Amino acid sequence: MTTLAAPTRTAVLDVVIPVHNEEVALALSVERVLAHLATLPWTFRVTIADNASTDRTSEIARRLSHRHPAVRAVHLAEKGRGRALRRVWSTSDADVLVYMDVDLSTDLGALLPLVAPLISGHSDLAVGNRLARSSRVERGLRREVISRCYNVLLRGSLRVGFADAQCGFKAITREAAAELLPLVEDEGWFFDTELLIVAERAGLRIHEVPVDWVDDPDSRVDILRTAYHDLRGVVRLGTALARGRLPLREVGERLGRVSADAGSGRIGLQAAMFVVVGVFSTLAYALLYLGLRHLAAPMTANVLALLLTAIANTAANRRFSFGVRGRADVLRHQAQGLLVFGIGVAFTTAALLLVPDGTHPTVEVVVLTAANLVVTVLRFAAMRWWMFVRR
């Protein structure tokens, strides 16, 4: 039987396994993890974070902690993967904090390349990447599509540089965790995605490791519900970043990872929120135009629809895209917005003049919508560099 290293205050690795009602898989998984850790050249600890289990999981975790000196059990009264990781990571004294799923879907052979860059000081976080070309992944089509769409969404909306946000195989240095955990709000499945995004925005180094991954057919994760909460998390975090609420540069400075890009990226986030507002504005414009078209001529309907949506668009972008609050300069911002609106009217009117008489109103909407896309780009530039410049 392999002799396991006893947990010490100077343990290098603390491997956290969050569990909820895992009485069947827990013991075997922990034994496998312990056996693999014994082959690595560092002292270690395995922490079982029980998330309010109602079966025998808590009892099994305690038995494992009594049987193996390198195992400890932590019980939480509430569910939440993020809550469990926050609780254990924030109190651990290990140099490197690791997280892995209890089903061990990720091959443990990737553990050494995951933690080595953190132990050497090269990187601050490390993540498993199931989407790398050299990775070997076995999972159903549904999970594959949802996972890839989610990561595409992150790259498109928040401009992330890492490839796989939700692989249950991650590591972070204790110093980085101490700085980042207070900035992460989510307590559930979006926790580690939020952690990675905040770390990247602060200029921290994220190391990606190709992994072999086999889907657990008995997984009880509600994919659709998780996806919904993740989308809410993306909107919340994107809004916070666009408004500059997080002290990202300060975090990078304290960890010695400051670069010219640390804490930057606001323009990309502002553009993402601007696009969201623009989509709703464009839909509102089209509906208003169609409604007004039955009461007025095309030119009049176009001007009225543009005027109403321009006022609402300026107010929404002021609040959500550029984070400007309070009543100060509201009238000035609206006046500037109306000037941009005037340019939009001129441009879309010119486009409307190109439509032959007698054309169906739907065709007019298509032409005007295309013209408004051009006006939208001009509007963002004006808001970014003229209207909402912080003085």
Image (cartoon, grey):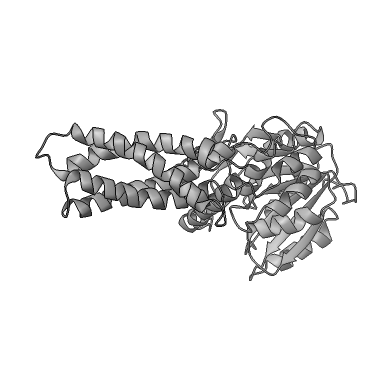
The residue positioned 70% from the left and 55% from the top of the image is 85
- Residue at the far right: name it: 9
**In the foreground, 344 or 48:** 344
Residue in the image at 49% along x and 40% along y: 383
Q: Give coordinates of residue 331: x percent, y percent.
A: 48, 52
191 or 92: nearer the viewer: 191
Q: Which quadrant holds the C terminus?
A: top right
Query: Residue 387, relative to residue 93: is it above or below?
Result: above
Q: Is residue 300 left or right of residue 251?
A: left
Which is nearer the eye, 148 or 344?
344
Residue, x 76% and y 44% (percent of image)? 176
Q: Please indicate whether residue 225 sits to the left or right of residue 62 in the image.
A: left
Q: Position of residue 15 (x, y in %)?
A: 75, 49
Indicate whether 248 appears above or below 205. below
The residue at 32%/52% (across/down) is 284
Horizontal side of 374 relative to 381 (left or right) equals left
Residue 203 lies in quadrant: top right
The x and y percentages for residue 198 are: 65, 44
Rendered image quadrant of residue 160: top right
Total number of numbered labels? Answer: 0
Is residue 283 visible in this depiction of the protein?
A: no
